[in-house]
Image (cartoon, coloured by chain):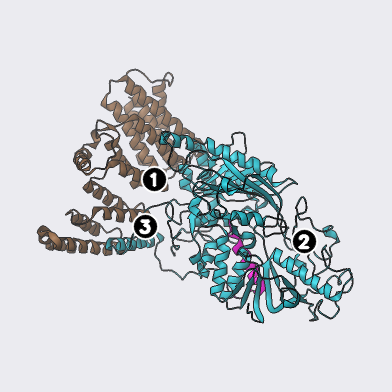
Chain colours: A brown, B cyan
Amino acid sequence: MYTAWNHRREALVPVFKEGGQQAMQAAAEELALTLRALTRNLKSYSAWHHRKWVIGHRLTSLEAEITLVETLLDADDRNFHGWAYRRFVADLMGMPVQRELEYTTRKIQHNFSNYSAWHYRSKLLPLLHSEPGVPAAADDSPSAAAERQAMISSSRAGATGALVLHQTLEIEYELVSQAFFTEPEDQSGWIYHRWLLGCSVAHWQAAPESEAERARLADVLGCQLALVSDLLDLEPGSVWARKTRAHLLGLMQRVGGAAGGSAGRGSGGEAADCVAAAAAWEDLEGLDPYRAGYYRHACSVSARASV
Amino acid sequence: MDLASRYDVIVLGTGLVESLLAAAAATSGKTVLQLDAQDFYGGRWATLSIDDFLAALRPGQAAGATGLEVAGSTDPACIGESHAFLVDLAPRLVYGGGPMVDALLASGAHHYTEFKLLQGSYMLDSGDAQRLTSVPSTRAEVFASRDLSLADKRVLMRFLQRFSGLLPHNEGGEVRDPVPADTHDPVLATPFADFMTNTGLLRADLRATIAHGALLLPDPSLLSTGVVLDRLALLQRSAGRYGAGSGALLCPMHGGGELAQAFCRSAAVGGAVQMLRSPVVALRLESAEGSQIGGGAATVSDSAGPKVGASRPVCTGIYLGTGDDRQEVAAGVVIGGVAEIASALHLGEQMADAAQSHPDGGAGGVVHGAGQPCGEVSDGTAGGAGQPCGDASSCPSSEPERPRAPTLLRCVAVLDAPALLPGQDRVGVCLPRPEGPVVWMLALGHTLCVCPENRTLVYLWTEAAAERGARSVLEPALQAVLRAASGTALFAAQGAAEGGGGGGVSAGPASLLTAVYYTEAPSDLRPDALPSNVTACPDPGSDVAVDSCIASARQLFHRTFGEEGRFPLDPDPPAPDAEDVASDEEALEALRTALRTVDGTEEAAKENPDLGESGWAPPLDT
């Protein structure tokens, strides 16, 4: 079907180039057409792509697109096409990051089993609450938005370079723990938690000689381990909780192994962690045999790291 | 007023259940005459201005109230103009996906009603802490709650999942109505309190949160799990129905009396005739053999009444008015509120006895025997518990069909703040008590157009357990909630946010201006005192949600008119469906809306927790 869309696009190129009333009308017609196509199949890649192409010409109202996407996501908040489209439009519009962040917060409050919302959040946080990075600001003025758009576009590419602030991470850990205690079987929260751990580790990786960072990381890992262990007391069969615990033990092993020793975990902590991590992975093999290979691999990786 | 000489159905009173029956009868083609002695609709379910409310509380008046105490002033200079308030005699909520909404739609009465969502459900814990904690009833609310520890969230969720697991689901994962609770499944037969404990809710406060807070149950040890499942299904159908994350309960705008009035209008549309300020009504009775009681031939002749086991008399119609102006109207059946029926029966007997110059006379007092009401409508006797005459054992014939309706303790209060909690002027609070039944509370503000902007109406009610007056039970409860509300972190945060700049919607914690306490005794009627074609409709009772009235109305409809045929206020059964998956269906609807928006032919509704002027949207059909 995409060849037909392509053909249509080729025909439209000169029309759009002309600009003016004709072009706007044509654009509106294209949007109506894609809407009818989407009505029949909300997950049609071709229709979404065509729509993106049309609005990219900026001949139509982008606010209306946001309204459309919000309506769609209210009805089905896990449609990743909708979320990807929203990111695209937000980018195009230079939407303030704060507003988008609040949108994800709202969506998560309504239904936290929403991988797309957590994922979008993971893309936005580094833009707003990180060092170095775009300074936290929520102002809406068009010039600021345009300026931001330039900053966002460049820093989206370089987002991996930004370190999310510690206090932001604390808030996010608290939020996501509400999710996995309410519903331990829902993986979106756990995956976001994994990303948060990565953010915490990144601080130490950026300054490996800093004892302060290492200690802070060990602290965070210790807290999270206690939390997950509490959950396991209530739900011993939760595979994701066990996976996260094993992962945490593996991380603690590496952090504790650096110069300066392991803060507050007692002597021989390092070796104990190694054993504990290995044991945790072995338990998982039994509990979740479909992924036995993954667990065996993880076990061997953590064993190697301790040598 | 020109009345026909006969109506299929005569309805005495305009309370909610009898109005439901009037609407049902009218839409099924019967001729209906509906009368009310008052000059307002609703009877014991009415919504009234302050002055009318206080008048209705006088002894023998519409509310059936006794033991009235007023704390504070009802002077308009103090609280506000009387007509600026709309006070409910029977405050109620409506489940968003429940049988009342279905009935409103089926009867067309929804055109006359508007609602707003209840904004918050809270519980005041009965321990020392006395905090107001929010009650979660959905997974999203559990997630968002700031009052539950992480471990509590897990325990609650596990319970909810196991409990929901008892509901039958169809292949699409949608909840079906549970099987009627007379199955022999031992789990369903367990008292719900035990089921909660067995399923991990070991702490009393968590059990109270679920049973009283989320499910609005009075006493979980008295209800089987199977029966409570119905309530859970209702809750799941209602939560989120009017927008993602919205609550399950609706508040009627302009007061709960609007519901009764809406069904009256619907009955009128169906051809019913209604008359307020109707003159005095008495029932005209005939014995089953056809001879008229009291009008001529002697039947009831000795003071002990007819022999036990004599068949019940039949009501052939009513007398309207007294003396020379008296009109007779024939009726097929008579329906009415308990108080109205009791009064009409009593007057009928009085007239019959007066006509026969009977020495024992029914004038005043209480007389035994078939055809006589056993418990009089409460008329202001001290204690006001509506004690039955003599003791039950001296009354001949079988045990009553249903348990006695409870005596209620009620309070209506006015606060001098726009809302009980900041930003939430429609909240419900339940207060479980170790020493007695749960106290229920509703705080409703001007967004429902029931009071001025700077005031809040608060209702408290509970079933009376011991011989204590309304004020001694409810005043401490009210004070406890006000203290807890003023102490909540919400206010502290609000104060900080406003930076002490004043202005804004909520200026601070609410304080009490006026409180009116009273006891509402049930009007009672022994079922065997009723003629065979007379149906008495129940009083409001202590239920928080109004949906149980539909079941009562349905049952009474079938008892009165026979079992065949569908209850006219039930929704049409859904048409057999194609294989559309629910989420695609909703997405389609969403896109159609979006299409209209993009075309600019219709303003799309913005996300807004309040439902705006038109109240609520028709439910999505599955």
Disc 3: which residue? B605
Q: Measuring 43% from the left and 56% from the top, which residue is drawn there?
A: B611
Measure the C-alpha gap from mark 2 to mark 3. Answer: 53 Å
Q: Measuring 53% from the left and 70% from the top, which residue is drawn there?
A: B107
Q: Chain of mark 2?
A: B
Q: Is residue B555 magenta?
A: yes
Image location of residue A281, percent across then percent down: 40, 35
SS assignment for the magenta stretch, majority: helix
- What's under tag 3, amino acid-wise? Ala
Image location of residue A39, percent across then percent down: 30, 63
- What's under tag 2, amino acid-wise? Glu
> Badge 2: few (under 14), some or many (20 or more) residues near its Cα, within 10 Å?
many
- Under tag 3, what secondary structure? loop
Q: Chain of mark 3?
A: B
Image location of residue A283, percent across then percent down: 44, 36
Question: Which residues lie in the magenta part?
Answer: B544-566
Disc 1: which residue? A108
Disc 2: which residue? B376
- Ranked by sequence position, the earlier of labels 2 and 3 is 2
Q: Are marks 1 and 3 in contact (CB under 8 Å)?
A: no
> Badge 1: few (under 14), some or many (20 or more) residues near its Cα, within 10 Å?
many
Q: Measuring 73% from the left and 58% from the top, which residue is drawn there?
A: B404
Residue placed farthest to the front in the image?
A: B77
* In front of the other: B605 or B126: B605
- Under tag 1, what secondary structure? helix
Left or right of A166 in this view: B71: right
Quadrant assignment, res B415: top right
